[in-house]
Image (tube, helix red, strand yellow):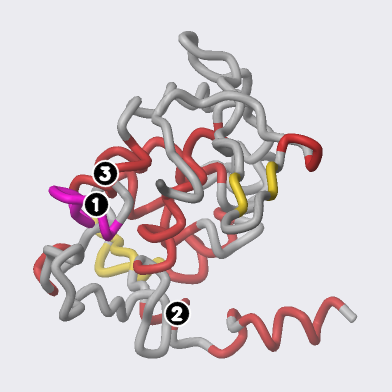
């Protein structure tokens, strides 16, 4: 028998007195997450929706049929759960990390980790990996993705003040055209974490 089982129906966690120890094995009860506000949307301004019932299998890299692309689509609504960009000053990527439905997306860490796997700045993603689960290549995030709402949030969640970043990264081409140049931000050491921490001391 397996020492632990799993389920796709979220509920509250377990207590130590629920663990059963015998001579040859330790049985742990199923650990699942609270239902939150489901079947309704969450209680934050972002109203995080209920996670797909099978999200734990979709995002388990060792489960049959799971994949990064499926996990990404299932987890996409919960990205605001995993960062702390302040809603009052970052209108592009306000966090929702207190939403009661966030806990259902705990297994999404495998996606968020990969989308922060970079070669240098946050714009230089390394999404390719020699692994059956990771079924995407470099074209998954390629070119100018700032017109895609999710990727705007992914890039801007690093900052406290969205307007400051927009102002600093905007290049005026002529009287009627201005463009955002991300290299002015992400290749500018002023915005690197070490310098931000140093300025705050």
Q: CA distance from mark 3 to mark 1?
A: 8 Å
Few, some or many C-alpha atoms within 10 Å of disc 1 (few <14, some 14-19, many ≥20)?
Answer: few
Q: Secondary structure at mark 2?
A: helix
Residue 63 magenta-highlighted: yes
Q: Are marks 1 and 2 in contact (CB under 8 Å)?
A: no
Q: Position of residue 33 (x, y in %)?
A: 58, 32
In this rendering, the label closer to the viewer, 3 or 1: 1
User: In the picture, residue 122 is in which quadrant?
Assistant: bottom left
Which residue sits at x=31%, y=81%?
124
In the shown orientation, is residue 64 left or right of residue 170? left
Q: Please state, as top left, top right, bottom left or bottom right, where the C terminus lies in the image.
A: bottom right
Residue bearing the label numbered 2:
186
Which residue sits at x=80%, y=37%?
17
Q: CA distance from mark 3 to mark 2?
A: 32 Å
Question: 93 or 10: nearer the eye?
Answer: 10
Q: Earlier in the sequence, mark 3 or mark 1?
A: 3
Question: 163 or 201: nearer the eye?
Answer: 201
Q: Earlier in the sequence, mark 3 or mark 2?
A: 3
* Disc sitting over residue 58 in the figure: 3
In the shown orientation, is residue 198 left or right of residue 134? right
Q: Are marks 3 and 2 in contact (CB under 8 Å)?
A: no
Report the residue that reaches farthest toward the front.
23
What are the residue bounds of the magenta stretch?
A: 61-69
In the shown orientation, is residue 28 left or right of residue 80? right
- When the figure is inspected, residue 145 is found, relative to residue 199, above or below; the finding is above
- When the figure is inspected, residue 41 is found, relative to residue 94, above or below; the finding is above
Q: Position of residue 21 (x, y in %)?
A: 69, 49
Which residue sits at x=43%, y=67%?
113
- When the figure is inspected, residue 88 is found, relative to residue 129, above or below; the finding is above
Q: Position of residue 183 (x, y in %)?
A: 37, 81
């Amino acid at each position: 028998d397996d020492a632990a089982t799993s389920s796709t129906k979220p509920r509250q966690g377990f207590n130590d007195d629920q663990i059963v120890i015998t001579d040859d094995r330790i049985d742990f009860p199923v650990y699942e997450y609270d239902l939150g506000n489901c079947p309704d949307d969450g209680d934050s301004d972002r109203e995080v929706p209920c996670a797909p019932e099978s999200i734990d299998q979709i995002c388990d890299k060792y489960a049959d049929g799971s994949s990064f692309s499926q996990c990404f689509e299932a987890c996409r609504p919960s990205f605001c759960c995993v960062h702390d960009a302040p809603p009052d000053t970052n209108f592009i990527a306000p966090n929702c990390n207190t939403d009661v439905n966030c806990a259902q997306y705990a297994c999404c860490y495998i996606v968020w980790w990969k989308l922060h796997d970079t070669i240098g700045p946050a714009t230089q993603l390394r999404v390719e990996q020699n692994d059956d689960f990771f079924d995407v290549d470099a074209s998954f995030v390629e070119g100018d993705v700032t017109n895609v709402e999710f990727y705007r949030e992914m890039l801007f969640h690093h900052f406290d003040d969205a307007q400051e970043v927009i102002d600093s990264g905007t290049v005026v081409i002529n009287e009627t055209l201005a463009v955002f140049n991300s290299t002015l931000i992400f290749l500018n050491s002023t915005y690197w974490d070490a310098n931000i921490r140093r300025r705050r001391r």
